[in-house]
Image: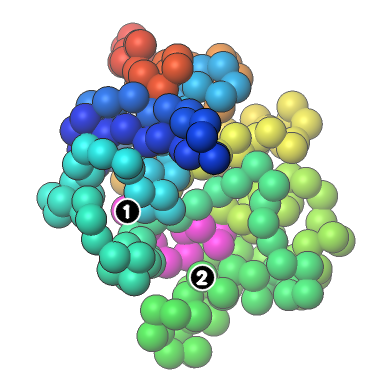
């Protein structure tokens, strides 16, 4: 489904160059649940951004669902990303001026889906994630766990093939963090490919495969023992 070949990412600030990814080779099959771990600054979030088409490699090739997207324009990448990739962030990234319902519906605004169909899909997703009773509330009126549930609903409502999660439990207490992890396992069991960045060894152990990064390189690629 996803394939990186010799992918490097170098950040340049003035005369200083920092290698975030160093010749990464990686294959992720459809339906996998992959955890990306490693110390701060090792390239985890950069790798997730490249996989999500939010950032482009300095060198190397990236195949997304069989298409080599290296060198594609931003508009083409946006079109490919829309509806195919869902994102969950540590900071939730909900819009305070919008209701819960409107935040989730926003993910469907640019798909061309008729308004009536959008509302049906949003209502169903909020119900599935257990926050339908909060549909008219603003994000600030929700607990952290509820906000992350809304963010997950927004990420899933368009039916993406892959869900990318960057420290999805980072702003949550243990109970709500465990709740989110259960949701991710369910989402993966239903067929969605999940790739998650995490600092938590316990959460990484729940994935079926773990990648450990150091200095922009994958130093461990391990499948969970059955």
From the viewer's perspective, is residue 127 above or below residue 165? below
Q: Can residue 96 be seen by looking at this rendering?
A: yes
Residue 161 badge: 1
- Assess whether residue 158 is covered by the magenta stretch: yes
Find out whether the residues at labels 1 and 2 contact each other: C-beta distance under 8 Å.
Answer: no
As drawn, the residue found furthest toward the front would be 15
Please tell me in which quadrant of the rendered image residue 90 appears.
Answer: top right
Left or right of residue 188, residue 45 in this image: right
Q: Position of residue 133 (x, y in %)?
A: 74, 66
Q: Nearer the viewer, residue 31 or 97?
A: 97
Q: Secondary structure at mark 2?
A: helix
Left or right of residue 197, residue 80 in this image: left
- Assess whether residue 100 is covered by the magenta stretch: no
Residue at numbered disc 2: 107
> What residue sits 82% from the left and 50% below the top?
143
> What residue sits 57% from the left and 53% below the top?
152
Q: Position of residue 70 (x, y in %)?
A: 22, 51
> What residue sits 51% from the left and 57% below the top?
155
Q: Nearer the viewer, residue 76 or 223?
A: 76
Q: Residues within 10 Å of mark 2 (few under 14, many from 20)?
A: many
Left or right of residue 49, residue 68 in this image: left
Left or right of residue 106, residue 49 in this image: left
Q: Position of residue 154 (x, y in %)?
A: 55, 62
Q: Which residues are magenta?
A: 153-161
Q: Can residue 20 be seen by looking at this rendering?
A: no
């Amino acid at each position: 489904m996803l394939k990186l070949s010799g992918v490097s990412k170098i950040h340049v600030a003035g005369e200083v160059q920092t290698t975030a990814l160093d010749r990464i080779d990686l294959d992720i099959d459809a339906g996998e649940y992959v955890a990306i771990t490693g110390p701060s600054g090792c390239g985890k979030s950069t790798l997730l951004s490249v996989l999500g088409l939010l950032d482009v490699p300095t060198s190397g090739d990236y195949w997304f669902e069989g298409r080599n997207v290296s060198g594609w324009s931003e508009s083409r990448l946006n079109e490919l990303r829309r509806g195919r990739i869902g994102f969950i962030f540590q900071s939730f990234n909900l819009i305070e001026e919008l209701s819960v319902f409107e935040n989730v519906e926003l993910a469907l605004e640019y798909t061309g889906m008729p308004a009536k169909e959008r509302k049906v899909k949003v209502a169903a997703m909020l119900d599935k994630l257990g926050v339908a009773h909060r549909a008219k509330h603003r994000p600030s009126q929700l607990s952290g766990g509820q906000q992350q549930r809304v963010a997950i609903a927004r990420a899933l409502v368009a039916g993406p093939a892959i869900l990318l999660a960057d420290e999805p439990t980072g702003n949550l207490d243990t109970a709500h963090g465990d709740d989110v992890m259960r949701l991710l396992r369910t989402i993966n069991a239903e067929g969605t490919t999940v790739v998650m960045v995490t600092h938590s060894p316990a959460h990484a152990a729940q994935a079926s495969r773990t990648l450990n990064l150091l200095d922009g390189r994958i130093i461990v690629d391990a499948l969970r023992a059955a």
